[in-house]
Amino acid sequence: MSDSYCPAWIYAIICNEICKNYVASDLDIAAFANKFATKAEASFSDLTASKLAAGAESIVRFLGTIEGVDVIQVCSAFTYNTALFERDGSPRKAKGLFKKDDTQGAKFEATDEDAEKLFRTFAFRLRSNPNLLAPEGWSLASVEGLKWVSEVVNQEVSFIDSLG
C-alpha cells in the first residue's frame, strides 16, 4: 500500500468508470464504489468506497445539468483522454528522464470536486472537438502503467456489493 495519495487524474478515471457503469446498469453507485475500493485501496489507501462514491456522484450531478449527451460515449472519451494525455493535450508519459512517474502518487489528496472539475473541463472540450472521442475498441487495459486501474474498474459487480 502506498503512503502517498492517488493522483487526481487516476481518481477521476475510477470515479468516471463508476459513473459509466452506474448509468449502464441497474445497480447503484455504492455497489461499484464498494467493489472497486476493495482492489483500489491496495494501491492507494485513500481510495475508499465513500470517496469513490462521492466523486462518481459529483460527475453524475454534473451530467444531469447538460442535455442531449451520450453519457457512455462521454465517459469513455474521458477515460481515454485522461489516461493517455495531459490536460494540455500532450501525451502522458508514465516515465521519463526529467519527469517523475505521475502514476506513483501525489502529495495532496484529490477530492470529489477535483474529479468533477476534470470531467467538466473535458466535457466542454469534447463538445467543441469531437475528435476527442475514444477510438472503437480501445481499452484501459492497453495503457502501460494503468493495468491495475483496468483491473479495478473491470470487476464483476453485483447487488450484494451495494451492501458494503
Image (cartoon, rainbow, N blue to C red):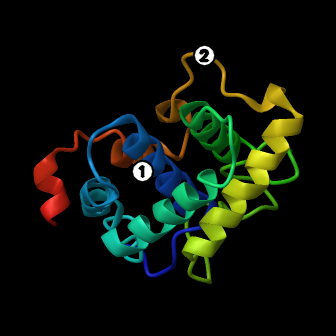
- Look at the image and tell me whether residue 124 can be seen: yes
Above/below status of 137 relative to 28: above
**What secondary structure is marked by label 1?**
helix
Above/below status of 163 relative to 73: below
**152 to the left or right of 68:** left
Q: Amino acid at mark 1?
A: Ile
Q: Position of residue 30 (x, y in %)?
A: 29, 61
Residue at the farthest top position: 136
**What secondary structure is marked by label 2?**
loop
- Look at the image and tell me whether residue 103 can be seen: no
| Quadrant for the N terminus in the image | bottom left
Q: Earlier in the sequence, mark 1 or mark 2?
A: 1
Camera-nearest residue between 29 and 152: 29
Image point (34%, 39%), residue name: 154
| Quadrant for the C terminus in the image | bottom left
The quarter holding residue 105 reads bottom right
**164 to the left or right of 69:** left
Characterize the local packing of mark 1: few (<14), some (14-19) or many (20 or more) Cα atoms within 10 angstroms: many
Above/below status of 85 relative to 134: below
> Label 1 vs label 2: CA separation?
20 Å
Characterize the local packing of mark 2: few (<14), some (14-19) or many (20 or more) Cα atoms within 10 angstroms: few
Q: Position of residue 33 (x, y in %)?
A: 33, 60
Q: Which residue is mark 1?
A: 18
Q: Amino acid at mark 2?
A: Glu
- Residue 136 is tagged as 2
Image point (64%, 64%), residue name: 116
